[in-house]
Image (spheres, rainbow, N blue to C red):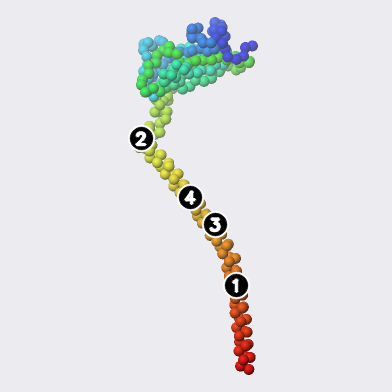
Amino acid sequence: MNVGILSKKDIINEMEHGRLIKRADKSRVEPCSYDMKIGTIFNNGQVVNESHPKANEQVIIQPGEIISVFTFEELDLPVNIAATAFAMNSQSSRGLLVLNPGHIDPGFKGPLTIKVLNLRKVPLALGLETPIFTIVFEFLPKNTDAYDRNISRNEREREFNARDVETAPRDLAELVVLSKKYPFPTRQEVKDIVKGHWSSWVALSFMFIAAIGAIVAAVAAIANITIDSPRSESQAQQSVERGVSDNTLSSSTSSEGTNTQK
């Protein structure tokens, strides 16, 4: 049994036996991949596919705008083959960002769903049959459970369009919205945020330094008390000894005075 990435020969062989890719074009097979193209564009509630009156017209994507598309080709993966979709470098180079490439389970049947974002500063034209995905296939060591949520293309388009209209973000601003009223902060608001942030850190730094200073002062005070205590005891002892000496001298003087009087 074959294991690993399918080569060009393997892909064509699978296609000739009615597996792997439906509506395929052999000219789009690469050495170990297949380049998929756009077959449906979801634009402002319209499902623009090959049967749509505007199928031959290009859709203009504004800077920062997001749209959804389906691939023209439909996968038909057997239970021993998985696939991985990648953004095409040719599209990335022109500023079209593909947001959701990824893994496709064995047994999946149908077109791939794609979100694209225009990262350019100017509008970008996109039409049906535009190359959009490079897909790589891989043989598994053994058969596995098949993907079991397959539906027809028409049903998939209707369901997706309804969901897309209701919930999908229309542009980059909706993806990173900060509030309902002001989707983006102004330059002054950003400055205030940064200033407030650093002001807080500076204030905390001064508080920390002050706390350290208080601790050092307390330790120094304790050390001075410890040093002064023996000195005070020594001075007291010296005072006592001096007092005793003075008393002794006074007694001696008094005794001598008594003897003289006698």
Q: Is residue 165 above or below residue 5?
A: below
- Does the residue at mark 3 contact the one at mark 1 (Cβ under 8 Å)? no
- Looking at the rendered structure, the kind of residue marked 3 is Val
The mark that comes first in sequence, 1 or 4, is 4
Q: Secondary structure at mark 2?
A: loop
The span from disc 3 to disc 1 (Cα, nearest Å) is 29 Å
Q: Which residue is mark 3?
A: 219
Please, which residue is most extreme toward the front here?
260
Asked whether 84 or 223 is in front, the reply is 223
- Looking at the rendered structure, the kind of residue marked 2 is Thr
The mark that comes first in sequence, 3 or 1, is 3
Please, which residue is most extreme toward the bottom here?
262
Query: Could you tell me which residue is drawn at 40 percent across and 42 percent down?
Result: 196
Query: Could you tell me which residue is drawn at 39 percent across and 28 percent down?
Result: 173
- Does the residue at mark 4 contact the one at mark 3 (Cβ under 8 Å)? no
- Looking at the rendered structure, the kind of residue marked 1 is Gln
Asked whether 199 or 116 is in front, the reply is 199
Residue 216 percent across, percent down from the top left:
52, 54
Q: Which residue is mark 4?
A: 209
Residue 53 percent across, percent down from the top left:
36, 11
The span from disc 4 to disc 3 (Cα, nearest Å) is 15 Å
Q: Which residue is mark 1?
A: 238
Where the N terminus falls, by quadrant? top right
